Image (tube, helix red, strand yellow):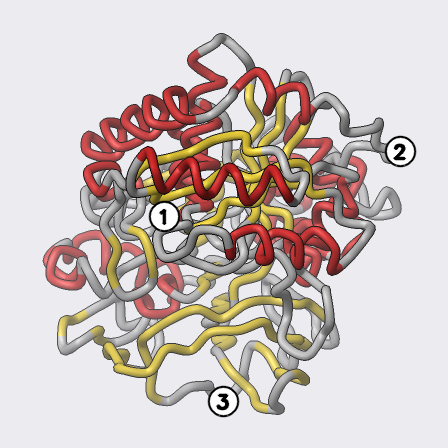
Amino acid sequence: MPRLVIAAPSSGSGKTTVATGLMAAFAERGLAVSPHKAGPDYIDPGYHALATGRPGRNLDAFMCGTELVAPLFAHGAAGCDLAVVEGVMGLYDGAAGRGELASTAQVAKLLRAPVVLVVDASSQSRSVAALVHGFASFDPQVRLGGVILNKVGSDRHEMMLREALEEAGMPVLGVLRRAPQVAAPSRHLGLVPVAERRADAVSSVAALAAQVRAGCDLEALMSLARTAPPLDCEAWSPERSLDPRDPAPSAVEARDLGQSPGRRPVIAVAGGPAFTFSYAEHAELLTAAGADVVTFDPLRDEALPDATTGLVIGGGFPEVYAPELSANAPLRRAVADFAAAGGPVAAECAGLLYLARSLDGKPMCGVLDADARMSERLTLGYREAVAVSDSALAATGTRLRGHEFHRTVIEPGAGAAPAWGFTHPERRVEGFVQGAVHASYLHTHWAAQPSVARRFARAAAARR
């Protein structure tokens, strides 16, 4: 599998611009391009999916473990001609206090992939060679194959940068001029997701492709991608990852659960502009565990999908759409009635806010006796967690690594039966387990613990 990792010295250098533009430019050539993102970010993969027509997938060595990075990559890249991996933060930045763990450099090493360094050259000339030399020599196991210079101001500026990098022996694979018209808008948690600006996002991705096509040597980049050696791993499979000692419900089990033979439980997953955060592997695991996954939009749909027996409400931006979500009273009542009747609900971050009594003073579903509001404080970072209450999602004692990323607070922060106990970096309990509802701020990647998908699918099957 030809592959490239697109990295940078720091955030804000232009990784997303280059990675998305490259994906789109190669896809325009008729190649099947597999898009990936290092780290837990949900928003960039939406742009990657728009550029390639394939699901954007995350490679997170902290949440999933280093042993799953290459198999998850191989799963996503199966059948493709090229894979492009966008890095996270600076090349060597990872989980705080954990060395290289979850860094772009570690992902590149696990994938045995060459790295292209995107450098913001707007305020330097010859010093770029010293910067690149430092990144190339810091870890000899990271293979830096070339540089793409971003935000170059003029022909003379480009000439000085090229001369410096030629002295350093580092190939220049592309030069991009300053082009603010292709920038995607941002707000309190980063870029605005594709689902909220689809028409404009399509135009932005097309502009990125044109910019990259004009400024980058696509042939040289493809040649570099082909130097990646074979990966010695088996591709991850949702079916194989589920414990073979705990098979999918048989027809007899389905009958005992009140489920008609041949019929599968229906798990409704919130989508639309307000709920855009989801890992593709979650739906794949639920499907492998015996469920039918159906998407609904809480901004538009006034009822849950027909025959819903399980409900997943992931992350997103309900704070941006609080008035519209609140105005959809029929769906709020349907969610509250479903939870009150014992229907299994798994809610993460945005889902937690939607289940609260109110969000910024606007009525929400009222499933939880808690109120949420926007805050000036950003909560961000990896967490190590253990389930402290039995739920439809996790048995007590289940350990998961996750990620928090929000600028809201909910009061109280935990219910009488909390969802998780955090063991690192600080010790505290968080979230709510109430009946068959599991609600928390913690984003998790179920590929790391497929038993949660199996457990949730079984809970949904029991509602038939």
The local secondary structure at tag 3 comes to loop
231 left or right of 274 in image: right
Classify mark 3: residues with Cα within 10 Å, few (<14), some (14-19) or many (20+): few
Disc nearest the viewer among 1 and 2: 2
155 left or right of 326 in image: right
User: Can residue 81 be seen here?
Assistant: yes
Measure how far apart labels 1 and 3 are at the Cα level: 29 Å
**Mark sitting earlier along the chain (1/3):** 1
Tell me which residue sits at (74%, 60%) in the image.
138
Considering the image in quadrants, where does the N terminus appear? Answer: top right
Q: Nearer the viewer, residue 374 or 437?
A: 374
Tell me which residue sits at (26%, 34%) in the image.
201
Query: What's the residue type where badge 1 is placed?
Result: Thr
In the picture, residue 385 is in which quadrant?
A: bottom right
Tell me which residue sits at (40%, 48%) in the image.
43
Q: Nearer the viewer, residue 414 or 146?
A: 146
**Mark sitting earlier along the chain (2/3):** 2
Q: Which residue is mark 1?
A: 276
Measure how far apart labels 1 and 2 are at the Cα level: 33 Å
Tell me residue 415's x, y (percent): 46, 86
Tell me residue 105's x, y (percent): 69, 53
Tell me residue 315's x, y (percent): 40, 58
- Circle on res. 232: 2
Query: What's the residue type where badge 3 is placed?
Result: Ala
Q: Residue furthest top?
A: 30
